[in-house]
Image (spheres, rainbow, N blue to C red):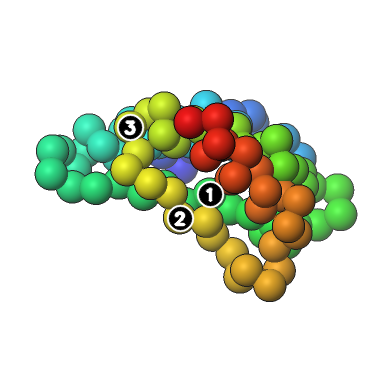
Amino acid sequence: MQQILQYDEAPLEELPTRGFSADYVARETRRTIAGVGEGVKVYPGIDVDIPTDAEHTKCTRAGVRDATLAAFAAGADGVVISRKYSEMRLDNLSGVGDAMRSL
């Protein structure tokens, strides 16, 4: 599955503790844009505070900022911030604002 989806992040057993990088967001955004062609808007989902096991990677403000910037740098028309708002930590969600202000 990793090979089919071109996940080049980490070995499968390490992925839960390392997580997906901002570069992954950029690669997937570019792949999607190329796949759907012109005239179709692309809005990558940026996950904020998805529940994980204690030893797994955790969301950070910087990670949210970097993923948001990567999506726009790769040509996204916007982003969708994924997860139930009441479960998001405002500091992590503020990473989106940090990215938008820098754009």
- Estimate the x, y position of residue 57 in percent, counting from the top left: 76, 44
Look at the picture and state if 50 lies above or below 14. Answer: below
Q: CA distance from mark 1 to mark 2?
A: 6 Å
For the residues marked 1 and 3, what is the alpha-carbon distance in whole angstroms?
Answer: 15 Å
Q: Which of disc 3 and disc 2 is earlier in sequence?
A: 3
Q: Secondary structure at mark 3?
A: loop
How packed mark 3 is, by other alpha carbons closer than 10 Å (few <14, some 14-19, many 20 or more), is: some
Query: What residue is shown with label 2?
Result: 80
Mark 2, other Cα within 10 Å: few <14 / some 14–19 / many ≥20:
few
- Mark 1 vs 3, N-terminal side: 1
- Position of residue 24 measured from the top left corner of the image (x, y, whole percent): 50, 32
- Asked if the residues shown at circle 1 and circle 3 are in contact, with their CB atoms under 8 angstroms apart, the answer is no
Q: Amino acid at mark 3?
A: Gly
Local SS, label 1 = strand
Task: Note whether 76 is above or below 89 in the view shown.
Answer: above
User: Residue 46: which numbered mark, if any?
Assistant: 1
What crowding class fits label 1: few (fewer than 14 Cα within 10 Å), some (14-19), or many (20 or more)?
A: many
Single out the residue that lies furthest toward the front: 101
> Percent position (x, y) of residue 102?
55, 30
